[in-house]
Image: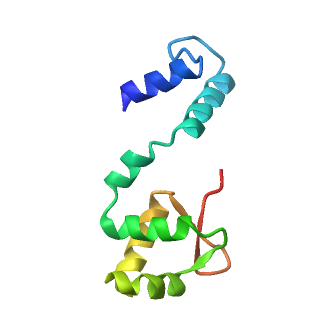
Amino acid sequence: MRPKLRQLARDQGIDPSARRELRDAVTDAVRLGACNIFLDELLDALHQDERAVLLQVAVSSLPVPTDDLAQTLADTGLTRERVAHAARSLTHLSLLVMGVTTSALERYNL
C-alpha cells in the first residue's frame, strides 16, 4: 500500500515529508483518501458474506432494512444469522452505518 500512497501523493502534488500545520496535514490526508479508497484491497480483505452484504447495500441510495437484506440475499445461500453477523462486522469496520431509529443499514456518501 505504501507505494500506492506515495504515487497517489505525487499525482496530487503532495509531499508527505513536508512540514505543515496539523490542519493542512489532515486536509491532505482526507484528500488522498477521497482520491483512492483502495477498494480492491478492501474488498479482498472481507469475508465473502461481508462482501455480499456490502455490495448489496452499496447499490441502494436508501437505507436497507436488515430483514429485507436477509431476504434479498437468501438466494445466495446466506442465512439471516450470517447476514446479521456480516452486517455487524461491516458496522464495526465503519463500512456501513446502522440507522439510529431503524434496523436499516446505510452506506456512506462521500
Which residue is painted at 56% across and 32% down in the image? 32
Placement of 45 over or under 8, stated as above or below: below
Q: Position of residue 43 (x, y in %)?
A: 38, 54
Q: Position of residue 59 (x, y in %)?
A: 56, 67
How many numbered marks does the figure carry? Answer: 0
**In the image, is residue 101 above or below residue 25?**
below
- State the scheme by which the image is colored: rainbow
Is residue 17 found left or right of 106 in the rendered image?
Answer: left
Please tell me whether residue 26 is drawn above or below residue 109 in the rendered image.
above
Determine the residue positioned at 36% across, 33% down.
1
Which image quadrant for residue 46? bottom left
Q: In the displayed orientation, state which residue is furthest to the top.
A: 18
Spot occupied by residue 14 in the image (x, y as percentages of width and height): 58, 18
Query: In x, y percent, where is residue 83?
Result: 40, 78
Q: Which residue sits at x=50%, y=13%?
A: 17
| 105 sits left or right of 84 in the view | right
Q: Indicate left or right for 57 with 75 as reference.
A: right
Please report the residue visible at 45 percent of the width from the left and 28 percent of the height from the top.
Answer: 5
Position of 82 compared to 19: left or right?
left
